[in-house]
Image (spheres, grey):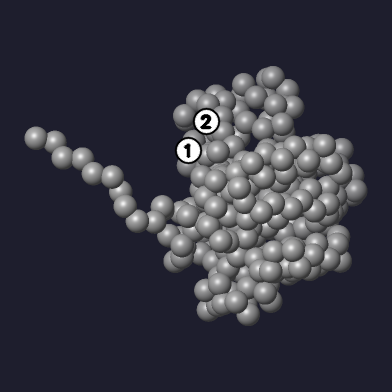
Amino acid sequence: MTLCSKRRGSIMFELTGKTAIITGASRGIGKEIAMKFAKQGANIAFLHFMDEENAKQTQAELSELGVKVCGYECDVADFEACKAAFDKIIEDFGEVHILVNNAGITKDKLMLQMTESDFDAVIAVNLKGAFNMTKAVYQHFMKKRRGRIINMSSIVGLTGNAGQVNYSSSKAGLIGMTKSVAKELGSRNVTVNAIAPGFIKTDMTDAMPEKAREAALAAIPMKRMGQVDDIANLAVFLASDEASYISGEVIRVDGALAT
């Protein structure tokens, strides 16, 4: 005889009543994280920059999920703009519980061809942008004595990659930032973790030359690229109460590529 029962009580990883700030969320991984968070009940404040059309579409899709949603145009590389965006989010939502530092850019070249501006631009968005937004929420999380910070790093921040000195440096820097802020805020019940995606199917990987994409697939033991929801599912867990004792970690999502 087989007995079956339905699970009662709260849904695991439920985020109802929480507000999440997600940077770079008008498309790709950031948008998927926003969608997953909203499906778990979180209100969404998402940041975008010079991407108005996609931002409007994202806001419309998120609004259909029955949560409060506001989009804000903000250059995360601009310290004062980040502070102003956070102040407006507090005005609109009252408080914030989760920050996802996802905004990022690439300017890939071998170092021989890479210019100073190529290096500075990537560091400014990918690394300083995360500093700017973390600085904006820092005191708020300290006073509330709770919070979740999730930084989007990359496996190339762990392994390096030819032609990506700037990008790899920014993502390695995020790992150092993650571990340092986790130590600073641990006593205030704030967790800080990093996700290190491998090759995930996005606009960025779609733009890779065919030979480079084939070489990447050949190197992945699972022989396929990941999907954006593979990253979003982990982000939901790290944002939830179930991950309350996980902090300072860098979790790879790469099909065993960097093992």
Quarter of the rendering containing residue 160? top right
Check the image and name the residue furthest to the left. Answer: 1
Q: Amino acid at mark 2?
A: Ile
Residue at x-position 83% and y-position 47%: 49
Q: Image height check: is 125 above or below 80?
A: above
Neighbour tally class for label 2: few under 14, some 14-19, many 20 plus, Cα within 10 Å: some
Residue at x-position 78% and y-position 41%: 56
Please give left or right for residue 110 compared with residue 172 in the image. Answer: right
Q: Image height check: is 216 above or below 77?
A: above
Residue at x-position 62% and y-position 21%: 214
Neighbour tally class for label 1: few under 14, some 14-19, many 20 plus, Cα within 10 Å: few
Quarter of the rendering containing residue 231? top right
What is the quadrant of the N terminus in the image?
Answer: top left
Residue 146 x, y percent position in the rendering: 56, 72
Residue 190 x, y percent position in the rendering: 56, 70
| Distance between mark 2 and mark 1 Cα atoms | 7 Å
Residue 230 x, y percent position in the rendering: 52, 39
Residue 124 x, y percent position in the rendering: 82, 55
Visible residue check, residue 245 = yes
**Which numbered disc covers residue 256?**
1
Residue that badge 2 annotates: 220
Q: Nearer the viewer, residue 44 or 240?
A: 44
Q: Amino acid at mark 1?
A: Ala
Residue at x-position 57% and y-position 25%: 217
Visible residue check, residue 192 = no
Secondary-structure class at tag 2: loop
**Which numbered disc covers residue 38?**
none
